[in-house]
Amino acid sequence: MDFQLILALLASIIIIVLAFYIGMLVKRINTQKVVIANATKEKELQVAIKKQQRNENICESIRFIARATAQKQCNVSEASIRLSVLLETLLIEPKINIDNDYPAISTLFEKVKDFATHAERKEMDKKLLKQQDKQREVFENELEDAIIKEAQTLENFSL
Protein backbone atom coordinates (compact mmCIF):
# COMPACT_ATOMS: atom_id res chain seq x y z
CA MET A 1 0.00 0.00 0.00
CA ASP A 2 0.98 3.46 -0.60
CA PHE A 3 2.40 5.36 2.41
CA GLN A 4 0.13 8.37 1.82
CA LEU A 5 -2.91 6.15 1.76
CA ILE A 6 -1.93 4.55 5.07
CA LEU A 7 -1.33 8.00 6.55
CA ALA A 8 -4.73 9.24 5.29
CA LEU A 9 -6.44 6.16 6.70
CA LEU A 10 -4.72 6.60 10.06
CA ALA A 11 -5.64 10.31 10.13
CA SER A 12 -9.27 9.43 9.33
CA ILE A 13 -9.38 6.89 12.16
CA ILE A 14 -7.91 9.45 14.59
CA ILE A 15 -10.47 12.06 13.48
CA ILE A 16 -13.36 9.57 13.90
CA VAL A 17 -12.13 8.57 17.39
CA LEU A 18 -11.73 12.24 18.41
CA ALA A 19 -15.18 13.09 17.05
CA PHE A 20 -16.68 10.21 19.04
CA TYR A 21 -14.83 11.36 22.17
CA ILE A 22 -16.02 14.95 21.67
CA GLY A 23 -19.58 13.65 21.27
CA MET A 24 -19.30 11.78 24.59
CA LEU A 25 -17.96 14.91 26.31
CA VAL A 26 -20.76 17.08 24.91
CA LYS A 27 -23.31 14.51 26.12
CA ARG A 28 -21.76 14.57 29.61
CA ILE A 29 -21.80 18.37 29.67
CA ASN A 30 -25.47 18.45 28.67
CA THR A 31 -26.31 15.86 31.33
CA GLN A 32 -24.48 17.92 33.95
CA LYS A 33 -26.31 21.06 32.83
CA VAL A 34 -29.63 19.28 33.35
CA VAL A 35 -28.55 17.99 36.78
CA ILE A 36 -27.36 21.46 37.81
CA ALA A 37 -30.57 23.08 36.52
CA ASN A 38 -32.70 20.57 38.45
CA ALA A 39 -30.64 21.07 41.61
CA THR A 40 -30.97 24.85 41.25
CA LYS A 41 -34.75 24.58 40.79
CA GLU A 42 -34.98 22.29 43.82
CA LYS A 43 -32.92 24.68 45.93
CA GLU A 44 -35.03 27.66 44.82
CA LEU A 45 -38.17 25.69 45.66
CA GLN A 46 -36.82 24.83 49.12
CA VAL A 47 -35.92 28.50 49.72
CA ALA A 48 -39.39 29.58 48.62
CA ILE A 49 -41.01 26.98 50.90
CA LYS A 50 -38.90 28.10 53.88
CA LYS A 51 -39.70 31.74 53.11
CA GLN A 52 -43.40 30.95 52.92
CA GLN A 53 -43.29 28.97 56.18
CA ARG A 54 -41.42 31.81 57.88
CA ASN A 55 -43.99 34.34 56.66
CA GLU A 56 -46.85 32.08 57.80
CA ASN A 57 -45.31 31.82 61.27
CA ILE A 58 -44.90 35.59 61.42
CA CYS A 59 -48.51 36.10 60.28
CA GLU A 60 -49.72 33.72 62.99
CA SER A 61 -47.72 35.68 65.59
CA ILE A 62 -49.17 38.95 64.28
CA ARG A 63 -52.71 37.57 64.55
CA PHE A 64 -52.06 36.21 68.05
CA ILE A 65 -50.62 39.49 69.38
CA ALA A 66 -53.32 41.52 67.63
CA ARG A 67 -56.05 39.35 69.16
CA ALA A 68 -54.52 39.70 72.63
CA THR A 69 -54.22 43.46 72.16
CA ALA A 70 -57.78 43.84 70.87
CA GLN A 71 -58.98 41.92 73.94
CA LYS A 72 -56.82 44.16 76.16
CA GLN A 73 -54.74 41.20 77.35
CA CYS A 74 -51.54 42.74 76.00
CA ASN A 75 -50.03 46.10 76.85
CA VAL A 76 -50.31 48.42 73.83
CA SER A 77 -46.67 49.49 74.09
CA GLU A 78 -45.48 45.91 73.98
CA ALA A 79 -47.93 45.15 71.19
CA SER A 80 -46.72 48.13 69.17
CA ILE A 81 -43.11 47.05 69.50
CA ARG A 82 -43.80 43.41 68.67
CA LEU A 83 -46.20 44.11 65.80
CA SER A 84 -43.91 46.71 64.23
CA VAL A 85 -40.95 44.33 64.31
CA LEU A 86 -43.00 41.41 62.98
CA LEU A 87 -44.51 43.43 60.15
CA GLU A 88 -41.05 44.72 59.25
CA THR A 89 -39.54 41.22 59.16
CA LEU A 90 -42.00 39.77 56.67
CA LEU A 91 -40.17 38.63 53.55
CA ILE A 92 -42.42 40.25 50.97
CA GLU A 93 -42.13 42.81 48.24
CA PRO A 94 -43.22 45.51 48.46
CA LYS A 95 -42.71 45.85 52.19
CA ILE A 96 -45.69 46.83 54.33
CA ASN A 97 -45.66 50.56 54.96
CA ILE A 98 -46.30 50.47 58.69
CA ASP A 99 -46.33 54.27 58.98
CA ASN A 100 -49.21 54.56 56.50
CA ASP A 101 -51.08 51.32 57.15
CA TYR A 102 -50.84 51.28 60.95
CA PRO A 103 -50.04 54.86 62.03
CA ALA A 104 -50.96 54.49 65.73
CA ILE A 105 -48.83 51.36 66.16
CA SER A 106 -45.98 53.03 64.31
CA THR A 107 -46.24 56.24 66.35
CA LEU A 108 -46.20 54.46 69.69
CA PHE A 109 -43.36 52.23 68.54
CA GLU A 110 -41.28 55.26 67.60
CA LYS A 111 -41.99 56.87 70.97
CA VAL A 112 -41.14 53.87 73.16
CA LYS A 113 -38.62 51.86 71.14
CA ASP A 114 -35.65 53.34 73.01
CA PHE A 115 -37.13 52.90 76.49
CA ALA A 116 -35.33 50.48 78.79
CA THR A 117 -36.43 46.86 78.81
CA HIS A 118 -35.52 43.66 80.65
CA ALA A 119 -32.03 43.88 82.19
CA GLU A 120 -31.76 47.61 81.47
CA ARG A 121 -34.86 48.22 83.61
CA LYS A 122 -33.39 46.27 86.52
CA GLU A 123 -30.18 48.29 86.42
CA MET A 124 -31.91 51.63 85.87
CA ASP A 125 -32.30 54.27 88.60
CA LYS A 126 -35.78 53.88 90.17
CA LYS A 127 -36.62 57.57 89.79
CA LEU A 128 -35.67 57.53 86.11
CA LEU A 129 -37.58 54.28 85.64
CA LYS A 130 -40.76 55.75 87.16
CA GLN A 131 -40.39 58.80 84.95
CA GLN A 132 -40.04 56.59 81.88
CA ASP A 133 -43.06 54.51 82.93
CA LYS A 134 -45.18 57.64 83.39
CA GLN A 135 -44.16 58.88 79.98
CA ARG A 136 -44.98 55.50 78.44
CA GLU A 137 -48.38 55.56 80.15
CA VAL A 138 -49.14 59.01 78.70
CA PHE A 139 -48.22 57.76 75.20
CA GLU A 140 -50.34 54.63 75.69
CA ASN A 141 -53.37 56.61 76.86
CA GLU A 142 -53.13 58.91 73.83
CA LEU A 143 -52.99 56.06 71.32
CA GLU A 144 -54.70 53.09 72.99
CA ASP A 145 -58.06 53.34 71.19
CA ALA A 146 -56.45 53.76 67.78
CA ILE A 147 -54.02 50.88 68.45
CA ILE A 148 -56.87 48.60 69.51
CA LYS A 149 -58.70 49.43 66.25
CA GLU A 150 -55.57 48.68 64.25
CA ALA A 151 -55.06 45.47 66.23
CA GLN A 152 -58.62 44.44 65.36
CA THR A 153 -57.77 44.80 61.67
CA LEU A 154 -54.64 42.69 62.22
CA GLU A 155 -56.56 39.85 63.89
CA ASN A 156 -57.23 38.41 60.43
CA PHE A 157 -53.89 39.40 58.90
CA SER A 158 -52.62 37.31 56.00
CA LEU A 159 -50.51 37.79 52.92
Image: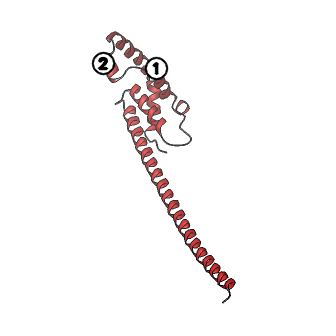
- Distance of label 2 from label 1 (alpha carbons): 27 Å
Q: Is residue 64 visible?
A: yes
Q: How many numbered callouts?
A: 2
Q: Earlier in the sequence, mark 2 or mark 1?
A: 2
Q: Is residue 153 visible?
A: no
Which residue is identified by label 2?
122
The x, y position of residue 115, in whole percent, is: 41, 20
SS state under label 1: helix
Quadrant in the rendering for residue 14:
bottom right
Q: Residue at x 63, y 76 (%)?
A: 15
Left or right: where 132 falls relative to 2? left
The x, y position of residue 90, in whole percent, is: 48, 40
Which residue is identified by label 1?
142
Residue type, numbered disc 1: Glu
**In the rendered image, the vertical position of residue 52 relative to residue 120, given as above or below:** below
Q: Residue at x 51, y 60 (%)?
A: 36
SS state under label 2: helix
**Front residue of this view, candidates 70 and 22:** 22
**Front residue of this view, candidates 21 and 156:** 21
Residue type, numbered disc 2: Lys
Q: Residue at x 49, y 53 (%)?
A: 44
